[in-house]
Image (cartoon, helix red, strand yellow):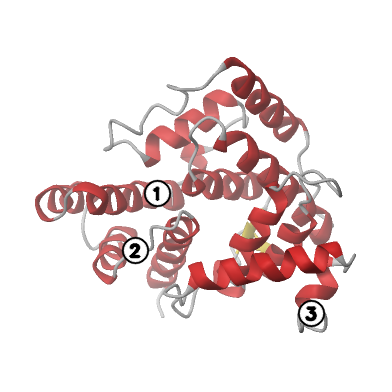
Amino acid sequence: MTYAASVADVITVNVAVGHCLAATPLTADDEMAVRRVASGELALAEEMARAARDVHGHAYERRTTALRMTEIERDPWVYAGPFDLAHLERVHRQVFLDCAQRADLLSTADVSSLDMLRSVLDHMAHERPALPSCDAVCDLAAEHWANLAYASGAVGGDRRVERAFVQLYLRQAGWDLDWSRVDLGDVSAARRVAICDDQDRYCDYRWLSAALRPGMVRFGQAVASTPLALDDMCERAIEGFRRMSAAKRRGIDPRAYFVGSDQTEL
C-alpha cells in the first residue's frame, strides 16, 4: 500500500466513524467519494457538484458533511485552534458548510446552555494532555468528550463535530485515535454512559476512556488497514449500554470490563 493510499484509508475510516457515531452510517458510494477526495484522485469541488446532482435531503447532508470532514482530516493544522467557543463553531460550520439549516451551531441556544458549553470549552482549553502518559491522555480526552457531548447536546451539537473536535485536540498534543483498533459499538455505548446523570456519578468518563484506549497512538501512527464493520453498530451500542450500565451499578472497573471477564451475565 502506498503512503497516499494509507492516508486516504485513515481519512475514510475517520470520516465514517464520525457519521456512524451520529447514527448516519455512510453508504459504499459515500465512502468511495471520500476516498477519491482523500487520495487526490478527484478534487473536492467535483465530488461536491456530483453530490448536489445525485442525492437529496438526508442523503445530501450525509454525503456533503462527509466530504467536508475530509478537509478537516486531510489538513488538521488548518483547523487547529484554542478550543474555545469560536473554534468549536468554526469546526461545526465546516462540517455543515453546505447545509444552511445546520450551519449555525448556536441559533437556538439559551443562555444557561451557552454558559455551560463555554465552561466546558474553557476547561478543555486549559487542560492539555502531557505527552508521556498514554493512559492519562486518554482519560483527559474522554473527560473532555463526555463534557462536550453533554453540553453540546443542549445547543444542538452533532456527534460528528464532537469526534472531529476531540481528535483535533489530541493531534495538537501529539496523539491520535486509530479507529480501526476500537469497537464503535462500545464507544457509542460508553459515550452514552458518560453523559448519563445519575445518583452514583455525574459524567462518568471512565467507560469512554476504557473504550477508546485500544486506539490511542502517537500522531502519525494511525493505520486503517481494514474496513470497519458498521452495519450492526446501533444494535451493539444499545446492548453495550445495557451491559455497561449494569456493570457500573455492580461497581465493576471499566478497564476490567473491557478485558472481557466481567461482560458475561450482566
Where residue 67 appears, as percent x and y from the top left, is 31, 51
Count neighbours of disc 3 (C-alpha within 10 A) and say few if under 14, some if 14 to 19, many if 20 or more: few
- Amino acid identity at mark 1: Met
- Given residues 59 and 95, the one toward you in this image is 59
* Residue 199 quadrant: top right
Residue 19 falls left or right of residue 124: left
Q: Residues within 10 Å of mark 1 (few under 14, many from 20)?
A: many
Q: Which residue is mark 3?
A: 259
Residue 226 in percent (x, y) is at 47, 80
Quarter of the figure with residue 31: bottom left
* Marking on residue 69: 1
Label 2 crowd (10 A; few <14 / some 14-19 / many >=20) = many
- Looking at marks 3 and 1 on the same chain, the residue that comes earlier in the sequence is marked by 1
Q: Is tag 3's residue or tag 2's residue first in the polypeptide sequence? A: 2
Quadrant where the N terminus is found in the figure: bottom left
Q: Secondary structure at mark 2?
A: loop
